[in-house]
Amino acid sequence: MKHRHSLVGQGYMLPFVLITFFFFLWGFARAILDVLNPFFQETFQINKTQASLIQFVTYLAYFLMAVPAGMMIRRYGTRKGVVVGLLAFGGAALAFVASRFFGPYIFRFYLLLLFVIGCGLACLEVAANPYVTLLGDKETAAGRINRAQSFNGLGCICGSLLGGIYCFSGENPNISIPYIGIGAIVLVIAVLFSRVRLPEFVIEDEDSAALSRPTKGLSARPLFLFGLFALFCYEIAEIAINSFFINYAVENHMVEWFTDFIATHFGMNLHPKFIASIVLSVGLLLFMLGRFAGSMLMQRMRAEQVLLGCAIGTVTMTTLVVMDIHGVSFVASILIFVFESIMFPTIFALSIKGLGGLTQKASAILMMTPIGGAIGTVLMGMAADMHNMTFSFLVPLTAFAVILIYSVVLLRKKPE
């Protein structure tokens, strides 16, 4: 099926650009966590399971905040929802300045602040994801949200690269400093954005009985429920892999080879985790490019077809990682980023398609799925502590297999 519609509706370009900026913002914030995980392992001398708590508290916040954020946005509008998210994010980041007063409890203080930041990010995502799908024709909603999410990928690259440079290229860096800078910038943006007027959409009700009993309405839609579970599994896989990719890359002999090569030929003794963070940034660059490519493909193909191809790719690449074929597995671990790139926005858009008056409520429920990242990261950390990083990739492999089944089920459904 070919779509010849513009990805962004007429008159909606400015709101699309503004909202897309927030995709970059939370990509940046989430990618820093992937660097903090190995950094905290080294700084506080903790194991992988303990370090996974930074992802756990952040994505637990998504789970707890998603529905309240959706209720707030339905009542007060998208703009106010975004501002509340920015204030929570910026205020918690700025509060890192107080970390020096917490002595032996500093790690717990960091976890508290990351939880509040997660609440702010949840508000931003609950507001932005469904909003982007409404800024144009419904036929191009999946492609539009993929294009916006591509800037999420750009934020991830910047967060991983700058975080790696700061944490692993110097001696005893103070992690509070970058967060204080981020907090100040975000609070300024919150003030500016509070003065911006955005078009608000009234979603027409397709099922008045379902709207009066929204939970029952959604529970009667099996494809939405399967999409919810598939998105939960995606979060397990994507967040767990990102959280421990640096650990995996360091334990793989390829990073050791790169480190020795640079030391021998250029006389630079670089931290292996710094090299690994560079490799992670390359993976995230491929992730971003994959989303742009996916957005273009979906103008010519059904989104369900693109999702199936990517699901096959992730299962294949993750299986190669588990097989531990040294260089082949290392390359496969990077290619996972390409194939998983379109999964979140595509599953999200397909899950809320045709829900009418249930769209905002369904979107808020879907935004609870990052709890999968909290669970997946802990499971992967435990598996790595008990065995090794290669073995721990069985966790995302299982999750990607569920998405593969979901994409097959979608393709068997006749296009509307």
Image (cartoon, rainbow, N blue to C red):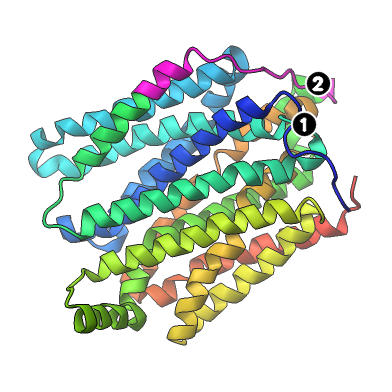
Q: Is residue 406 visible?
A: yes
Above or below 131: residue 400: below
* Left or right for 143, reference 98: right
Query: Which numbered disc covers residue 87?
Result: none
Which residue in the structure is indicated by mark 1? 217
Mark 1 in CB contact with mark 2 (< 8 angstroms): no
Mark 1: few, some, or many residues within 10 Å (few <14, many ≥20)?
Answer: some
Residue 116 x/y as whole percent: 35, 32
Instruction: Check residue 192 for magenta coloring.
Output: yes
Q: Earlier in the sequence, mark 1 or mark 2?
A: 2
- Between residues 268 and 398, which one lies in front from this camera angle? 268
- For the point 15% across and 57% down, which residue is it? 170
Q: Secondary structure at mark 2?
A: loop
Q: Is residue 74 above or below residue 395?
A: above
Is residue 40 in view from this perspective?
Answer: no
Quadrant in which residue 269 is drawn: bottom left
> In terms of image quadrants, where is residue 51?
bottom left
Q: Disc 1 to disc 2, how far (Cα)? A: 15 Å
Question: Which secondary structure is most common in the magenta stretch?
Answer: loop
Q: Secondary structure at mark 1?
A: helix
Range shown magenta:
188-209
Amino acid type, callout 1? Gly
At 65% from the left and 62% from the top, the residue drawn is 402
The answer to whether 173 appears left or right of 386 in the picture is: left
The magenta stretch spans residue 100: no
- The image shows residue 45 at horizontal and vertical percentages of 16, 60
At 29% from the left edge and 62% from the top edge, which residue is drawn?
48
Instruction: Please identify the quadrant where the C terminus is shown.
Output: top right
Q: Which residue is mark 2?
A: 204
